[in-house]
Image (cartoon, helix red, strand yellow):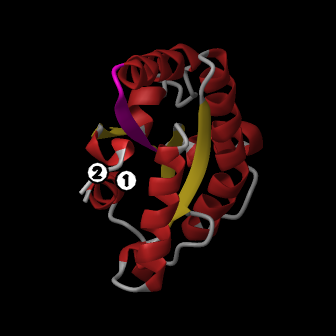
Amino acid sequence: MEIREEVRKKRVVIKVGTNVMTNKDNRIVGPILKELVRQIAALYEEDILTVLVSSGSAIAGKEILGDCIPKDSSTRRQIFSAVGQPRMMRHYYSIFHDYGMRCAQVLATKRDFSPGKHRENMINCYEGLLAEGIIPIANEDDAVSLSMSMFTDNDELASLVAE
């Protein structure tokens, strides 16, 4: 039986939290993202398939909106994340493009990893992206996650992606 090439390649999940990518003023630090992508590009050159689990959407949204939105912390988090996620992806897209690489956004909730069709779809998505040489960038879908379907943090998401 022949094993497909992409199945034999080594895989790694890299999780980067908000504390790694922000400065003391809670602002996204571009050079840190660039160094992260440089390291992922080096892994790619060694035929190591990489999934990036990245935080930062809420901070990126707060950079844009400031503090002038709802006082309810749950709604505020959803709004910051909804506004900030595209900004984070623009950062990543631009930096990966500089290395001649492609990336894709994969937003997940806990439900996506429950046994059944959602899990199967999630696995197929990651497998398809990796087979095409596209770096999946995963984050919790904070804009729609309710407390019962939220991950504890992106460490939990990273461990589920790694399974």
Give the CA separation, mark 1 to mark 2.
32 Å
Circle 1 residues within 10 Å: few <14, some 14–19, many ≥20: many
The residue located at (34%, 20%) in the rendering is 46
Image quarter where the N terminus lies is: bottom left
Q: Amino acid at mark 1?
A: Asn
Q: Residue furthest front?
A: 1
The residue most toward the bottom is 116
Residue shown at the point (36%, 81%) measured from the top left: 114
Q: Nearer the viewer, residue 139 or 38?
A: 38
Dot 2: element:
loop
What secondary structure prevails in the magenta region? strand
Amino acid identity at mark 2: Ile
74 above or below 12? below
Camera-near label (1 vs 2) is 2
In contact (CB < 8 Å): disc 1 and disc 2: no
Q: Is residue 59 left or right of residue 140?
A: right
Residue 95 sits above or below residue 104 on the image: above
Q: Residue at x 32, y 48 (%)?
A: 7
- Check residue 42 for magenta coloring: no
Disc 2 target residue = 3
Instruction: Specify the quadrant of the image occupied by residue 77.
Output: bottom right
**Viewed as shown, does residue 82 lie left or right of 157?**
right
- The crowd level at tag 2 (other Cα within 10 Å; few <14, some 14-19, many 20+) is few
- Image spot of residue 97 (x, y percent): 67, 23
Q: Secondary structure at mark 1?
A: helix
Which mark is drawn over residue 154? 1
Give the mark nearest the N terminus, 1 or 2. Answer: 2
Nearest the camera: 11 or 157? 11
Q: Evaluate whether residue 46 shows in this view.
A: yes
| Magenta stretch bounds | 46-53
* Res 39 quadrant in image: top left
